[in-house]
Image: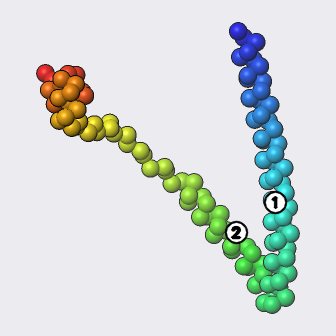
């Protein structure tokens, strides 16, 4: 009995580790690509407007984007209120065939 549980737990752990490794490698490659893109953007802006303007633009943009994501992180998720489903009343013909009083399928449980 415990052998199956341990085997399932081991498979789940191996899958989680594999996904974590893939996520880390993907994040590292994204950061390397973003670094090269940042360097290329700095070079393009520096050629057109100067080194100071390139540094200011590439310093301010990440600050605003980071502030935006921090604001998103602070926002709470909307609360979902689950309501009981409303039961549609059955047609009179179906009730007559079944021999009920015509109050719907929950009539016996809700009648006092």
Residue at the image point whose x is 24% and y is 27% from the top: 106
Classify the position of the C terminus by image quarter. top left
Question: Total marks drawn?
Answer: 2
Foreground pick, 90 / 74: 90
Determine the CA span between mark 1 and mark 2: 14 Å
Residue at the image point whose x is 79% and y is 84% from the top: 45
Foreground pick, 91 / 70: 91
Neighbor class of circle 2 (other Cα within 10 Å; few <14, some 14-19, many 20+) is: few
Picture disc at residue 106: none
Residue at the image point whose x is 23% and y is 36% from the top: 90
Residue at the image point whose x is 80% and y is 31% from the top: 14
Residue annotated with mark 1: 31
Give the quarter of the image for residue 7.
Answer: top right
Instruction: Please indicate, yes or no, whether residue 58 appears anywhere in the rendered image.
Output: yes
Neighbor class of circle 1 (other Cα within 10 Å; few <14, some 14-19, many 20+) is: few
Picture disc at residue 62: 2
> Dots 1 and 2: beta carbons under 8 Å?
no
**What kind of element bears circle 1?**
helix
């Amino acid at each position: 009995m415990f052998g199956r549980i341990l085997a399932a737990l081991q498979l789940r752990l191996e899958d989680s580790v594999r996904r974590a490794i893939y996520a880390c490698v993907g994040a590292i490659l994204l950061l390397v690509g973003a670094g090269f893109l940042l360097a290329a953007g700095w070079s393009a802006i520096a050629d057109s407007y100067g080194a100071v303007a390139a540094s200011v633009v590439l310093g301010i943009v990440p600050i605003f984007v980071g502030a935006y994501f921090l604001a998103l992180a602070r926002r709470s998720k909307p609360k979902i209120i689950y309501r009981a489903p409303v039961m549609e009343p059955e047609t009179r013909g179906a009730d007559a065939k079944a021999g009920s009083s015509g109050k719907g399928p929950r009539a016996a449980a809700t009648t006092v």
